[in-house]
Amino acid sequence: MPQPAENQSPEQKPKRWVYLLPLGLFAVLMVFFFFGLGLNPRLLPSPLIGQPAPEFSLPKLSNANELFQHTDLKGEISLLNIWATWCTSCRQEHPVLMKIAKSKQVPIYGLYYKDVPDQGVVWLQNYGNPYRENAVDEDGKVGIEWGAYGTPETFLIDQDGIIRYKHVGPISWNDWETKLLPMINSLRNNNDV
Amino acid sequence: MTSRLTSFCLMLFFVTAVPAEIAGFPFESETQEQRFRDLSSELRCLVCQNQSLADSNAGLAQDLRSELYQQVLTGNSNNQIISFMTERYGDFILYKPRFATKTLLLWLAPILLFIVGIFCLIRFSKFKNQGQQTQVNEEELQKIRALLQAEEEKQ
Amino acid sequence: MIPELGHFALILALAIAIVQAIIPGMGLLCRRADWMAVAKPAALLQFALVLIAYGALTYSFIVHDFSVLYVANTSNSELPLIYRISGVWGAHEGSLLLWVFILSTWTAILAIYSKRYPVDMGAGVISVLGFISIGFILFTIFTSNPFLRHFPAPIDGADLNPLLQDPVMAIHPPMLYMGYVGFAVPFAFAIVALVQGRLDTAWARWVRPWALTAWVCLTGGITLGSWWAYYELGWGGWWFWDPVENASFMPWLTGTALIHSLAVTEKRHALRNWTILLAIISFSLSLLGTFLVRSGVLTSVHAFASDPTRGVFVLAFLGLVVGISLSLFAYRAWQLRTLTPFSLVSREMALLSNSVLLLVTMLTVLLGTHYPLILDALGGGKISVGPPYFNSVFIPLMIPVVFLVAIGSLIRWREDSVSTLIKQLRTPAVLAIVFASVLSLLLPGKASFTAWFALLLAFWVINSCYVQLLQRLRHSHSLMQGLRKTPRGWYGMILAHIGLGFTVVGIALSSVYSQEQDVHMVKGDDRTLGEYRFELVDVERITGPNYQADMGTIRIYKNEKELMTLHPEKRIYNVRKNVMTEAAIHSNLLRDLYVSLGEQRNIDTGAWSVRLYYKPFILWIWLGGLFMVLGGLLAVTDKRYRLEVKQEKIKLDANHAPAS
């Protein structure tokens, strides 16, 4: 039983609802935690979505004397994949890219990021080349323009050279079928209309 | 004016006033160096996620530092540099969130909480004051004093 | 066989924890002494069983039993013995078992000293602790069992994270956990007080040593962790406002408020509900910390590999424990509220103000830590809230706190007059201004208002300490008698407050006057930092017990006289291939010289990236922490906490007399 409190004069004391405040605050926090469990804090949305592809002009991996430019991405829906030979997840993603290339749904361009050109040539010879063309970004400056923070990263670019989607990390076949391909199809349909 | 004067005096006395080098980047002036330092500690390294650009040794952090260095040398303003970074990486890169609608609560909460705290304190103490004259507590206090005294003497 | 024994012991411990929670709890509610008498043996038995489980896991580590999955993931045959013992808490599963072990240890200690509390209070507390044990043992067994085997056993283990292969890191986690878990005891006392409606000064006296012990451990853990980060992470920082650091700092803030509020409750029978609330919040924040670290909702350098099921479990447990206790608080505290008068100018008021400020600070840190999560959940995109934000809100909130420390320890209970207070504080204030001004002129480097102001605050606190000592001595017959008669708790307070002053000085001076260079150097290069010249003499390859390293030799000159040679290392651990910087530091009370070796930038020229730091007075930050710990320890050992209560005879039904 509660002790009878001395000097009780209820009208001067905090109201009953004040005692409910901590519980209320905690309940709000719990709701956010519950939703927070379903979020991935490491996945960053790109501010470039809906923006035209950043301008760049870089030597091609196949031929260092030729330039690959952002204007080359226009006219056709395409994927731009940022990769390097030092990137182990890229190695894991590579077979999926090969399969996508084989499906001939969409051309894949590569941004060969912070790596030595010769090694990339050998790598593609050994494992196969899913890319239509590769731009060599040896010092990583163009990577910064694209907001790259973890290879591999893949951008979906529409006919007008506008970035529509960014995928961070290796693409799985499931990602391709459930996310990228439907988006490509809807972009195509919109354009046809 | 005074700050310029003090920095001039300090130039005379301390060798260290010569702009230092950061990450192998030589600076032309102390202001440049200070701006670089401030900006690089307010920008977040995206790869390592919980380090600033200044603290990180990750490859991307080094690249972004050199980008930052170039821009500081070119004389871009802090706002220009920050919008360069957020245009590419989003607000996530800012360790000090911008004051905007969505961060309103974040920036105002400390002040609000402080005011609410002070308000409660004053209200609380007011009604405590009114109960001042009660004798019960004085007696109780005496009792406690006596008890404590007794305990102390026991040991 | 041994891991199975451990697993079995843990399951038995769960069964005993259920007994420990339910029977004495029922005994408390039904006023049955025989049921309450179960508390002590159950607590001791549960401790013994958890000890066996913990010992079994440690044994598996020591003998390299890689057939145990957890051992295989966190140990390696090359791992030195000390890190095999500390490796037990090197990852999620084992650290959770450590949590359980510490909880059962505290419970057992409480059971042993249960003579100091009335039977029903002791039984109730042990019962509440039992409920917490149940939650954590269930969590361990069902989502994070460290005893699981896997076949075939790998030939060797994946090694302990090299960051943790460090002597300080071996003691930091247990220390921190002792703090976290330690707050379970005041929490349990608070719950029993709410249930029983018994909230007197004796209650506060029973809780104080427990709250102090927890606070001491948490303070020690945080101090060690910060020191470790400073020398191990290699960029000279010591506090990063990382979510996990904040998770340990938030209960520290409310725990600090709690130990002060308890003083008011013990001495003046006031602020009782406030004390109860702080006890509940402190433990809730400890649980929250556990949730944050193990659920992956926030990114942190310290987080364990995240696992959604674990997150859901801890969240549910957190909701249950905190939800029930705050509901109980809302229901009962309102009934228990009392009026103990004190004036606006009184020690009660000063201590209350400070604990309100500490709570406000905690809420700010809480909001800042979770704001990215909240915004993301509301679809507002990703933002970061980092050190620049926290520093800009934390420091202004801490200034009044530090300012009030001096007042709170000098002002009289109940009521004091402003004029006497000013009279008492005049000398310390004037002296603080003089000391701060003189010292800031003596400091090398630019005159800085921040530094001056921090020194002022620190001296304000420190000066008020000896004013108090003088006051005490004035009232006693002789110096020695005065010193002897002063209780240890008082000395503890003084020591801790001086520690706070030290930490303020360390933080302010090191951040204002630090100098650093992040440079590329080839052998023979030198750089000047303040009055020190650093020369890179050599970098050579060395081999450690389980790593390879590049070891730099850096010679430091002052006024062209050779001062010392430092050897920073860049280690690559054999198994995980992690690259670790081992900074080389020379510390003294005036300054740290800090050198860390980065990567080789250019193989042709042999240029190494090197970070050089000159950090004046940084050691004072942790020295302050040490003083706070010592002060807390001194206060815990105050003799008035050792009193045993005269066991009140509980009114029993004639049929239910206790067995003994």
Image (cartoon, coloured by chain):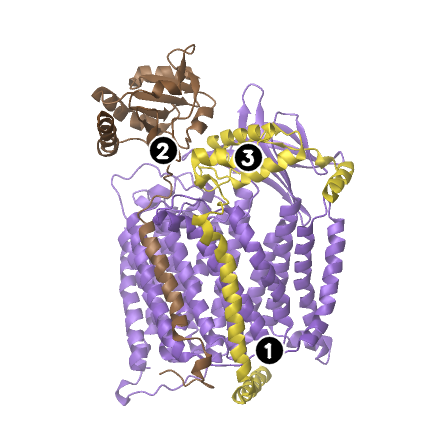
Q: Secondary structure at mark 2?
A: loop
Report the chain holding disc 1. Answer: C
Report the chain holding disc 2. Answer: A
Image coordinates for residue C34, horizontal then vertical, percent: 30, 80
Q: Residue C569, labelled with which disc?
A: 3
Q: Earlier in the sequence, mark 1 or mark 3?
A: 1
- Given the image, on which type of amino acid does mark 1 rest? Trp
Image coordinates for residue C242, horizontal then vertical, percent: 47, 48
Q: Secondary structure at mark 1?
A: loop
Q: Secondary structure at mark 3?
A: strand
Q: Residue B28, labelled with which disc?
A: none
- Given the image, on which type of amino acid does mark 3 rest? Glu
Q: Residue A49, labelled with which disc?
A: 2
Q: Residue at x 42, y 12 (%)?
A: A64
What is the CA distance from the residue labelled 2 to the residue labelled 3?
43 Å
Q: Residue at x 44, y 28 (%)?
A: A145
The nearer-to-camera label among 1 and 2 is 2
Q: Residues within 10 Å of mark 1 (few under 14, many from 20)?
A: some
Q: Are marks 2 and 3 on the same chain?
A: no
Identify the hue of chain B: yellow
Identify the hue of chain A: brown
